[in-house]
Image (spheres, rainbow, N blue to C red):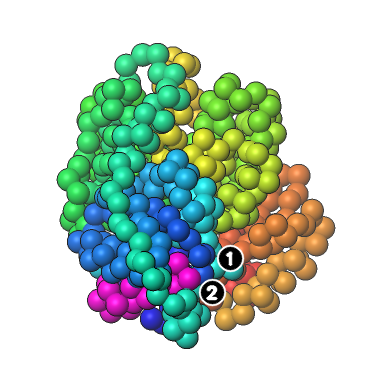
């Protein structure tokens, strides 16, 4: 059981750190912690997701709660079902982009409000360790099948403003994007790669954040005539994009584009962008008449901030795109649709829509293993004391021509650097200078 209770989910290697018996206990602990009565449970395509479902739901129903089984689905569909079905809790069985031997649970309260380490996962871990379950109910709950996929698709398609035929190349990575993308049937023409569900990931890791996982998609786009390409991650709560030339579009640039698309529908709305994003994102939101707000990294923080400010959208540099219209949670198909809406309306290729946003030069996220992360951040603070310093998440420093953010990893002795400047030369110089300080 050691180490599977994480900051944002429960995740381990099936048959080793995560077993059916442990899943049964987690089901009991989850129902004990929330005192819930109706729990939506979905699962991904991994071969062990079914036995984990059976064990987890046996624990939940033993405590007297009913399970609304929505079958094999994406994580965004599970969030939608949680809200739409009026459940008071939800569990998605998935290990996202992790290799096939991994599995786990993403946990929610009513209306898809996430449960993180600080808001319940640590409590559930304690209940499991201490066997502090509430007594089994006099009458066990029932498992009832619900069909959420069709309703989700109809909901997503209701936001379509696609005015001309669009052709997309889509890398499904043998994972849940196959189900998530059904929401766009009849809206766009799709030519798929690796479009058979296979939880062993036989072709490549389902992680569009890694550039090499996009190689097959880029090759396909370059060999055909497509408006753009999309790659989903394992549970389809993230998406990566390539333009019509097969060039990778940075995920913060997609945030700016989606913001522009949504602000045509919701003038003056609040839009969140994560603090690692380019200055160009804030500028694009302002130019489109929106109210930009900076968010911390991490879905639990972003969803909370969105609710507090009634934001219509938030984008994260990791490819998570959050929508008020999906209960303030991720919807990768809605992200794809919003990009399609914009490309359709603009009458320009995606590369031309992105070009004006490429105003600055970014380092990308660079990880450094250090003995004392706190000391590394303090060296940065002292050295750049003349800049505008803020601590929304880690340490950020802004100057007139460049900025940086340094954050500590939650789980490893790592410091993560993101830096951007107005010229490539300054970006490279400041990057090397900051890395030397971090690694001193």
**Residue at mark 1:** 119
Q: Does the magenta run of residues contain 306? A: no
Q: Does the magenta run of residues contain 21? A: yes
Quarter of the N terminus within the rendering: bottom left
Q: Residue furthest right?
A: 386
Q: Residue at x 52, y 31 (%)?
A: 257
- Residue 123: mark in rendering: 2
In the displayed structure, 238 sits above or below 283; it is below
Mark 2, other Cα within 10 Å: few <14 / some 14–19 / many ≥20: some
Q: Secondary structure at mark 2?
A: helix
Estimate the x, y position of residue 149 in percent, counting from the top left. Answer: 32, 39
Estimate the x, y position of residue 340 in percent, counting from the top left. Answer: 41, 25
Magenta region, residue range: 14-32
Quarter of the C terminus within the rendering: bottom right
The Cα–Cα distance between marks 1 and 2, rounded to whole angstroms, is: 8 Å
Q: Residue at x 37, y 58 (%)?
A: 66
Q: Residue at x 31, y 48 (%)?
A: 70
């Amino acid at each position: 059981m050691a180490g599977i209770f994480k900051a944002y989910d429960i995740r381990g290697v099936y048959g080793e750190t995560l077993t059916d018996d442990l899943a049964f206990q987690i089901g009991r602990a989850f129902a004990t912690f929330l005192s819930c009565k109706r729990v939506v449970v979905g699962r991904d395509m991994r071969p062990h997701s079914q036995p984990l479902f059976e064990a987890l739901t046996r624990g939940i129903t033993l405590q007297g709660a009913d399970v609304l089984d929505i079958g094999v689905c994406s994580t965004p569909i599970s969030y939608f079902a949680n809200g739409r079905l009026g459940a008071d809790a939800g569990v998605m069985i998935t290990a996202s982009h992790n290799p096939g031997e991994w599995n786990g649970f993403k946990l929610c309260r009513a209306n898809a409000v996430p449960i993180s380490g600080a808001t319940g996962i640590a409590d559930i871990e304690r209940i499991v360790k201490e066997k502090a379950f509430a007594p089994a109910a006099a009458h066990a709950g029932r498992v009832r099948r619900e069909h959420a996929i069709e309703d989700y698709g109809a909901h997503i398609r209701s936001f379509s403003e696609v005015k001309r035929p669009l052709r997309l190349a889509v890398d499904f990575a043998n994972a849940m994007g196959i189900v998530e993308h059904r929401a766009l049937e009849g809206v766009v023409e799709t030519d798929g790669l690796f479009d058979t569900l296979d939880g062993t990931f036989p072709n490549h890791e389902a992680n569009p954040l890694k550039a090499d996982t996009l190689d097959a998609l880029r090759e396909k786009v370059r060999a055909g005539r497509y408006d753009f390409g999309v790659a989903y991650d394992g549970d389809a709560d993230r998406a990566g994009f390539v333009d019509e030339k097969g060039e990778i579009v940075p995920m913060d640039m997609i945030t700016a584009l989606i913001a522009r698309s949504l602000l045509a529908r919701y003038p003056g709305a609040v839009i969140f962008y994560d603090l690692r994003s380019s200055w160009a994102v804030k500028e694009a939101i302002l130019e489109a008449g929106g109210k930009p707000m900076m968010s911390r990294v991490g879905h639990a923080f972003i969803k909370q901030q969105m609710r507090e400010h009634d934001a219509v959208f938030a984008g994260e540099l990791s490819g998570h795109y959050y929508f008020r219209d999906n209960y303030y949670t991720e919807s990768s198909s809605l992200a794809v649709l919003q990009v399609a809406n914009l490309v359709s309306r603009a009458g320009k290729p995606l590369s031309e829509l992105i070009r004006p946003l490429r105003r600055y030069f970014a380092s990308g996220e660079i990880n450094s293993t250090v003995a004392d992360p706190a000391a590394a951040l303090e060296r940065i603070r002292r050295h750049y004391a003349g800049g505008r310093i803020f601590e929304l998440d880690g340490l950020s420093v802004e100057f007139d021509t460049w900025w940086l953010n340094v954050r500590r990893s939650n789980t490893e002795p790592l410091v993560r650097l993101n830096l951007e400047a107005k010229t490539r030369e300054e970006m490279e110089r400041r990057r090397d200078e900051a890395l030397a300080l971090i690694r001193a």
